[in-house]
Amino acid sequence: MESTEKEAQNSSAICSVLQILGAKWSFLVIAELAKGPRRFQQLHRDLAIVRTQSLTDALRHLEKNGIVRREVFPTVPVSVEYSLTAKGEDFQSSLKEMEKWSLKWGAQTTE
């Protein structure tokens, strides 16, 4: 395989990942749900910087892409709990690598 073809495939794979996970707050939502299942209000409190509508949008996007599971409990009032799917859990190693990169390079300015 030629170098440019391989680069195009790598670029395409990154674009695919960003389409699935690229919603503005997705990474924070995934990191929070990695701690365990949460109800919406718990997530909203834990992610106080995220507006209600933005959190709703991120959860819907992640659910649609198979990263987050939404479970409805028939209580009064109805309870909804969010958790990571196997696909979402599998992303944890990538998040850890991103965190390591950020700790090493995040505070540095360009030279």
Image (cartoon, rainbow, N blue to C red):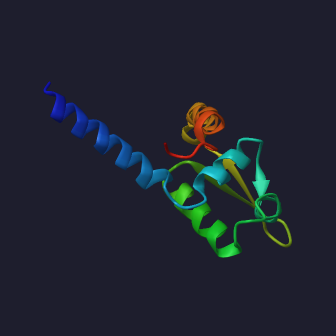
Residue 13: horizontal and vertical position, in percent?
34, 41
User: Percent x, y for residue 6?
Assistant: 22, 31
**As rendered, which of 14 and 55 lies closer to the eye?**
14
Tell me: residue 28, above or below residue 58.
Answer: above
Q: Indicate the quadrant where residue 97 lies.
A: top right
Q: Residue furthest right?
A: 76
Which residue is found at the position 37% from the left and 48% from the top?
Answer: 16
Q: Residue at x 69, y 48 (%)?
A: 83
In this view, the residue farthest toward the top is 1
For residue 77, which quarter of the picture?
bottom right
What number of labels is visible?
0
Q: Position of residue 11 (x, y in %)?
A: 30, 42
Residue that appears at 58% across and 34% down:
101
User: On the image, which quarter does residue 108 sit in?
Assistant: top right
Side of 55 relative to 23 (left or right): right
Q: From the viewer's perspective, tell me whether residue 3 is left or right of residue 52.
A: left
User: Above or below — where is 60 with respect to 82?
Assistant: below
Q: Residue furthest left?
A: 2
Front-most of 104 and 66? 104
Residue 71 rendering spot, x and y as whole percentages: 69, 56
Quarter occupied by the N terminus: top left
Name, please, the residue furthest toward the front.
Answer: 111
Instruction: From the viewer's side, name the closer residue of 87 and 34.
Output: 34
